[in-house]
Image (tube, grey):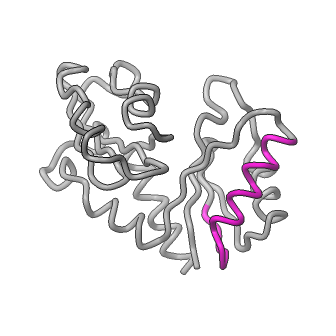
Amino acid sequence: MSYLALLRGINVGGNAVLPMKELSAIFTGCGASDVRTYIQSGNVVFNASDAAEVVSAVTKEIARVYGYPGRIVTRSAAELAAAYKGNPFAAAGAPIEMLYVYFLADKPDASTVKSLDAGRSPGDSFVVKAREIYLHLPNGMARTKLTNAYFDAKLKTVSTARNWRTVGKLLEMVRKAN
């Protein structure tokens, strides 16, 4: 079965450097097959009979070899397709360059979702659906106050963001892997 692994915080601003060729080798060494990466920000499409087992081993190996936590969020091909289809801002016709999604490691409970401040970043909008937070950011990701740190703290989980073009490309890759 095909999966997508999204690593958080690698190769961003020169921090937590992890070349994709090495990341691919780690996934293969931890039991994944047909491993492919996309751009330098930790997007890995792979096949495995037990994705959780592979990701657990990869996380430990990244910590052992590189000395930082391998925070990884995964989606099956079906979960990624559902997430792509479920973007309310894309459905409403918002410009693709203003669309982002935070993939969450865990589904937040309703009370934590209600604690989020819709006015935190004026002009920006978000919608939480299952394990995704869809964002419409007219001022761009660099200027928003809707950050990983904010959502992780409020929702008590790990999140990692991708722009909408990247999500579309990753979906295409996962579909081809099936």
- Residue 147 against residue 18 in the figure, above or below: above
Horizontal side, residue 113 vs residue 34: left or right: left
Image quarter for residue 145? top left
Res 39 seen here: no
Residue furthest to the left: 92
Q: Which of the two residues, 52 or 48, is positioned nearer the viewer here?
A: 52
Figure check: 50 above or below 74:
below
Residue most extreme to the front: 111
Could you say where residue 32 lies in the image, as x and y percent from the top left? 73, 69
Looking at the image, residue 128 lies above or below residue 76: above
* Horizontal side of residue 8 vs 142, given as left or right: right
| Magenta span dominant secondary structure | helix
Q: Which residue appears at 46% of the width and 58% of the height?
A: 169
Q: Residue at x 24, y 20 (%)?
A: 120
Q: Is residue 32 left or right of residue 132?
A: right
- Residue 37 drawn at (x, y percent): 65, 56
Q: What's the magenta region?
A: 45-64
Residue 128 within the segment the image draws in magenta:
no
Q: Foreground residue, 108 or 169? A: 108
Q: Residue at x 19, y 47 (%)?
A: 89
Q: Can you give x and y, in whole percent of width and height, for residue 156 in the image?
A: 44, 37
Nearest the viewer among 74 and 124 is: 74
Does residue 160 appear left or right of residue 120 in this picture? Answer: right
Q: Quadrant of the C terminus?
A: bottom right
The x and y percentages for residue 10 are: 65, 36
At x 69%, y 25%, the residue is 15
Quadrant in which the N terminus is drawn: bottom right
For the image, the number of numbered tags is 0
Q: Is residue 56 magenta?
A: yes
